[in-house]
Image (tube, grey):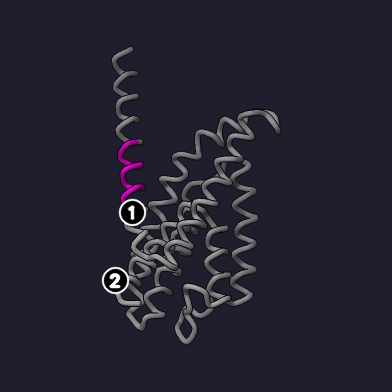
Amino acid sequence: MDLFSAICQGLGLALAVGVGGPLTALFIAMMAALESGIRPEATDYEFLGATWFLVTLLAIVVVFMLARSRNVMRWPQVAVLAAIGAVVCAASLAEEGEAAWPGLILGAAAAGFAALVAWSILAGAVSRAAGSEPGSREADAANVMIVAFAAAGIVLAAASLFLPPVSLVALAALVWLALSRRRRAGEKYEGLRILR
């Protein structure tokens, strides 16, 4: 794998972590443990496939699930996902013998951005579910969306491991999604202002 592929792989893994959350990070760590697609052994990031790191990620998955069910998110969780994104992106560069520090910056930015976009979509569904009965249509819809985002993150991570340039398409899609949501929010605000 050349430098361009390593950058694309790291970018894709970080975006996947932002979209899919710690469950996607756990998938990436398991792939590292199996030495499938990513092999950071003999680098500073060989802990990515270590048992203690897998257990830590599993604990983070549980904490995130509890926080989501109470509609608590935003900055602490975005920071955690950005840190994990930094690690997986840096590991991708390190396994190629490249300097890892640019991967830390790129990975943190990509994972943080993807997490904010994903949360902006999920927030409405989760807040509607918070005020409804368990098993209601709103609660079911929120759960389906959460599972869909986790699955999308895992699919993106798998694609990035074996077809790294896919990450560029994912980045373009997330940027488009963020811009379109911002434009719609601006139009909604304008509509409300006119009603006054």
Q: Which label number is shown at residue 87?
A: none
Residue range (magenta): 171-180
Rendered residue at 57%/76% (across/down): 33
The residue pinned by badge 2 equals 4
Picture quarter containing residue 1? bottom left
Q: Which residue is mark 1?
A: 169
Residue at 47%, 44% (x, y): give it. Answer: 119
**Inter-mark Cα distance, 1 to 2:** 15 Å
104 or 92, nearer to the observer? 92
Q: Main secondary structure of the magenta part?
A: helix
Identify the residue shown where x is 61% and y is 69%: 54
What amino acid type is highlighted by mark number 2?
Answer: Phe
Residue 63 in the magenta stretch? The answer is no
> Height in image: 66 above or below 133?
below
**Residue 70 appears left or right of 40:** right
Residue count near mark 2 (Cα–Cα under 10 Å), binned few <14, some 14–19, many ≥20: few
